[in-house]
Amino acid sequence: MYTVKEIFYTLQGEGRHTGRASVFCRFSGCNLWSGKERHRAQAICQFCDTDFIGSGPDGGKFARAEQLADRIAAAWPAQSTGGIRYVVCTGGEPLLQLDAPLIEALHARGFEVGVETNGTLAAPPGVDWICVSPKAGATLVQTSGHEIKLVYPQPGLAPQDVSELDFEHWYLQPMDSASRGANLQAAIDYCLEHPRWQLSLQTHKITRIR
């Protein structure tokens, strides 16, 4: 059984694939926070800005991988032309649910499969794009992938703490908080001083798209 909060078609707003047409499949549940505000102060990840509780009206429960893959495929516009279908599996923590049968079913429907994970669980074989966003205080298991996207500044986890990991692309993403202006400047300054790192902005918030 797969439990999904929402499925929707949009443009990827962050990281290497910023601006790419994508279907987002947001899985319910996370292993670093319950998603309930009363638990935030005790959570490992306390700065999450996403609602991932339960199965929403744009999601649901799916008994079989093929059923979920069909629902994801239905979100891709039939009239679209050119390009390769792309699905972003996110959460919450998508690797609590994303598995080989679903990846196979999505591939069969012409999708490249990306995942945005906190890295505390190993990605199953077949994922086409692995984006890891590590969190302070959480044990990192997925130590390689295509892109690392570090929320910055993050108390207890600095860029140099992950600098020996095996990733192709390196991004700092300013923490969205009451100090967002200072966080943005700090991220800009760090990228200028350490050119390996690139700045990732949450462009979906800037453009006000879903």
Image (cartoon, grey):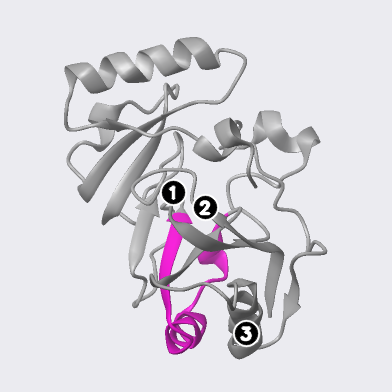
Q: How many numbered marks does the figure carry?
A: 3
* Separation of residues labelled 2 and 3 (CA atoms): 20 Å
Circle 1: residue type: Gly
Secondary structure type for disc 2: strand
The residue singled out by tag 3 in the image is: 70
Foreground of the two, 134 or 49: 49
Residue 27, how many percent across, how many down?
63, 63
| Quarter assignment of residue 194 | top left
The residue singled out by tag 1 in the image is: 19
Rendered-image quadrant of the N terminus: bottom right
Based on the picture, tell me whether residue 96 belongs to the magenta stretch: yes
Circle 2: residue type: Leu
Identified at 57% across, 75% down, the residue is: 79
Mark 2 or 1, nearer chain start: 2
Direction from residue 196 to residue 147 in the image, left or right: right
Which span is picked out in magenta?
A: 93-116
Mark 2 or 3, nearer chain start: 2
Identified at 25% across, 23% down, the residue is: 191
* Separation of residues labelled 2 and 1 (CA atoms): 5 Å
Q: Are marks 2 and 1 in contact (CB under 8 Å)?
A: yes
Identified at 57% across, 70% down, the residue is: 97
Secondary structure type for disc 1: loop
Based on the picture, tell me whether residue 179 belongs to the magenta stretch: no
Residue 104, how many percent across, how many down?
44, 86
Mark 3 or 1, nearer chain start: 1
Circle 3: residue type: Asp
Residue 144, how many percent across, how many down?
25, 55
In this view, the mark in front (2 or 3) = 2
The residue singled out by tag 2 in the image is: 11
In this view, the mark in front (3 or 1) = 1
